[in-house]
Image: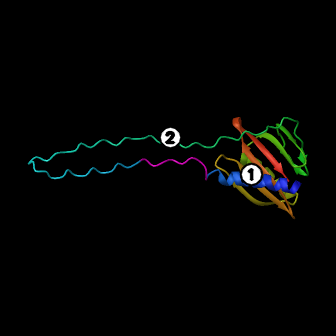
Amino acid sequence: MKTIGKTILLSVLAATLASCNAFAPQATATPVPTATSAPTLTHTPEPTGTPTQEPTQTPVPPTETPSAPDLPMPSGEPSTEWEGIPVMPNAIAGEGDSTGYSFTIKATAEEIQSFYETELAKLGWGLFTSGQGASGATLLMFMKDVSIVSVSIIPQPDGVMYVLLVK
């Protein structure tokens, strides 16, 4: 049951990162005005003209970057490690159970990624894959033998990062 839950969570995280760009609002093209046909000849010696209307310009609203997801923020005292996986020093708050551990920290996504690439390599974990979504969220997946651990790095307001560890 734990494996199914982890698989579902990893699938949702991977799908979220992969779909961030695909479903972002796209700008719509402004319609091009069509030409008015020339007046037809009549029996009158003077041709008649048809006034052309100026095309209306519809302003295209700018596309928006998806906002940070509303996540359950941890409130407990952060641990130094979870299930043998180190928790970054200077974490602000953290909590978890046997299926996952989340913590918040004031650091850049690059600092967090570098920390986990270095520290997990020391423990025999190799970076299997990584990706970044349009909202700035980063997903790192490490593999050791047949085990996988994911590190999700999700930006929050005020320079705080939400980090989720799933094994």
Instruction: For mark 1, give the secondary structure.
Output: helix
The mark nearer the N terminus, 1 or 2, is 1
Q: Which residue is mark 1?
A: 13
Report which quarter residue 92 is drawn in. top right
Amino acid identity at mark 1: Leu
The furthest residue to the left: 45
Q: Which numbered disc covers residue 2?
A: none
Estimate the x, y position of residue 149 in percent, counting from the top left: 83, 55
Count neighbours of disc 2 (C-alpha within 10 A) and say few if under 14, some if 14 to 19, many if 20 or more.
Answer: few
The magenta region covers: 22-30
Left-right relation of 68 to 115? left
Q: Which numbered disc covers residue 61?
A: 2
Please report the residue visible at 72 percent of the width from the left and 49 percent of the height from the top. Answer: 110
Amino acid identity at mark 2: Pro
Q: Please, is residue 149 above or below residue 72 in the view?
A: below
Estimate the x, y position of residue 132 in percent, counting from the top left: 68, 52
